[in-house]
Structures are given as structure tokens and as C-alpha cells.
Amino acid sequence: MKIQKIETFQVVWDTVLGNRPQRSAFVRITAEDGTTGLGEVSPMSLGLPSLSLIVQDIAPKLTGISVFDHAVGLERELHRLIKLGPEGVLSAAIAGLDIAFWDLKGKLLGQPVYNLLGGAWRRRHKFYASVGNIDRRSIDDLVRFVLKRVETERPAAVKIRLDGDRTGQDVDIAGDIAKAKAVRKALGDGFMLGFDASNGYSVGGAMQVGRALEDLGYSWFEEPLQHYHLGRTGEVAQRLDITVSAGEQTYTLQGVAALIEAGVRMVQPDLVKMGGITGLMQCAALAQAHGVEFVPHQTQPTVGHLANLHVLSTVMHAAKPAELADKWERALCVFETPGAPRDGVFTLTEAPGLGLVINEQELERRRVAITA
């Protein structure tokens, strides 16, 4: 079965990010019998850099190859275009195509992706509610928002995120600790909590905040330093008792290996940024081999989220719940699967491929084709 065509497009949502409507970026692969597979790329810059790269440079090379040569085809394109840099735009393009290939192969073989990956330890997934922009929220507003999400979604854990622009450092350590204390008080001592610093601290600042989080019983401390300071991030991880995590901005398997070597004890790669389903499976194996926790980052509420759950189904030791970021409701008008969580969990079906259920009419209404 050969690839007939590869299309790229955005979907426009009703929510606004900054001063423009929020968009997600997708790639669709069609086989010669008309079967399709859908993938998603990183939404940075609305996904346009990666989608354009697919249209101009990658799709022409993949059209006509066998569906089942997908790993060889993508590896060939990664190395052909490697001088663009193996990270960022190129790796996100490869990731989206990889997800689409797995979805397509599952449909052709009549199997859910998790079966093609070796089978599922679980199909029901607890999740944590990821709450952003805490640096711009008052303590009272943050607590109200967290309590509302806990009440309506019933997550197994909550992570609060700074979401700063990464140009400042140690901007409001006292305020950050005060907000962490307020959330702990609101949810009680037994509730699992995480804190995402969004690369906002120096080594000294990270140590100060990390010690406070330890006293408050937080379970993990995410990306305390700039992502390119691997050695110092490892230093902070080794000096603190709380689990320090990183990897959201790591785009290669080798980059994840470097984090582990530096001393990070929990890795969080994102499959729409690096390697897709294939890359994330490789990261899971790497984490297991080195005895570190594997908790993928994932903020896209559609294809990326569903693909992430398929991978997590195959992981024997799922240390923490899957991520569910805020504003996930934007996708319910188009993607009925996975949709809203039910009773605090997402459940994968036995449908072939990723098991996507799509409102095609609504998708077409919101679709913006990318042709160059």
C-alpha cells in the first residue's frame, strides 16, 4: 500500500492566544485506497514553519513510498535535512508525520495503535490538571481556578505553571512560594501537586523554591532552569530531594539521554515536538533502562493528546498521571475523542488507529489549508 498524498492544514479555534485566534497544526496522509491517517505538529508559531517544511521539502519525497516503510522514510528525510538543525521545526515536522503514519497503519491493519506498539498495560488513564499563568494571577484567583478544575474534571493531580516569557530570572520567588502554599492549603496535604517553573530561576533561586516545595509536599519540580543549562539542571536535581523534571524543550533522543546523564530523574519529552509516537517509545525505553520517571509533556487536546495516551498505555511503570492542560475544551467542537474526561479518567477504545472520532463538517468549516 503506497502513499497517495500528504496534506497540511490548521484548525482555527474560538479561543484567543495573545491577540489572535488559537490554532492547531495537522498533517494528513492518504493511502492509495483512500484510507487516511492524521498527525499533529507543535503549535509554536501556529505550526506554520513545520507545516511549510512538510509541503515544500518532505511530502514530495514520501509520496509514493510504502505505508510500511514509514520509519525508513522519515529517518531518511531527517538526515537529508539535518543541516536545518535536528531540533525544533524539523523534528516537529517529522513528529507530525510519524503520528499520521501510525494512525494510518492501525486503520489499514484494523488494530489500535497501542496493539501495534506491543499491547496495553492499561487503557484507562488518570490525568493531572495543568494550570498556567500563575505569575499573572492573584493568589485568590489562582485558588478559585484550581478548585474549579478539581471540582469539574476530578484530576488525580494538579500542576501549576509560571508561563513566563523566559527573559526574566528569579522575578518573584516569594510570590511564587506563596502561591504554591495557597494551592497546597486549598487542596489538602494528601493531594498530588507539581510546580512548573517555566525555566524561570537561577540555580540559587531554584534551590530556594525547590526547598519550599519539598516542605509543602509537592511531588515534582519542572524545568527550574533554562533548558540549555543541562549540567546545572542536573546539579539542582541531585541537590534537591523533590523530583526535578525536564525535557519539554528537548527535541532528540540524544538530548533526553543527555538530561538523564546530567542527573535529571524525570524526563518529559513531547511527541508533537520530537519523534512522534516512534520517538516517544524510544524515550520510554531509555527512561526504563536508566531508572528515571517517564512523564511526557503534552498540551494539545486533540491528536497529540490521544497519541500520547496510546504510548502511555504501553508503559509498564506509569509513575504519574498524563497531562491535561487548560483550554482543552476548545477542541470539543471537532474532536469527539478523547473529548472530556469522564469520572477523572480518559479511556481508549479498541477502534483502529488512534481511534479518532471527528466531526468532519465542523473540521472543514475551521480548516485552513497550508499549500506553501
Image (tube, rainbow, N blue to C red):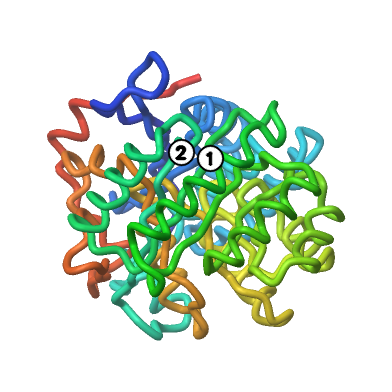
Q: Distance between the Cα atoms at labels 2 and 1?
A: 5 Å
Task: Tell me the crowding category of disc 2: few under 14, some 14 to 19, or many 20 or more residues within 10 angstroms, Cα based.
Answer: many
Identity of the residue drawn at 52% across and 25% down: 45
Q: Nearer the viewer, residue 175 or 31?
A: 175
Residue 219 lies, in percent from the top left, at 54, 68
* Residue 10 visible in the displayed image: yes
- Location of residue 169 with respect to 274 vertically, above or below: above
Q: Secondary structure at mark 2?
A: helix
- Looking at the rendered image, the quarter that the N terminus falls into is bottom left
Q: State whether residue 205 is above or below residue 50.
A: below
State which quadrant residue 201 falls in: top right
Q: At x 78% / y 55%, what residue is drawn? A: 233
The image shows residue 64 at horizontal and vertical percentages of: 51, 46
- Taking 352 as reference, is 77 left or right? right
Q: Left or right: 102 with respect to 234?
A: left
Look at label 2 and name its amino acid: Ile
The type of residue carrying mark 1 is Leu
Relative image position of residue 65 (x, y in whole percent): 54, 52
Direction from residue 63 to residue 17 in the image, left or right: left
Residue toward you, 119 or 180: 180
Q: Residues within 10 Å of mark 1 (few under 14, many from 20)?
A: many
The residue to which callout 2 is attached is 134
Q: Nearer the viewer, residue 16 or 97?
A: 16
Question: In terms of depth relative to the viewer, which is nearer, 45 or 35?
Answer: 45
Mark 2–mark 1 contact, CB under 8 Å? yes
Earlier sequence position, callout 2 versus callout 1: 2
* Above or below, 238 relative to 199: below
Picture coordinates of residue 4, whole percent (x, y): 41, 44
User: Which residue is labeled 1 in the image?
Assistant: 162
Q: Residue at x 42, y 51 (%)?
A: 182
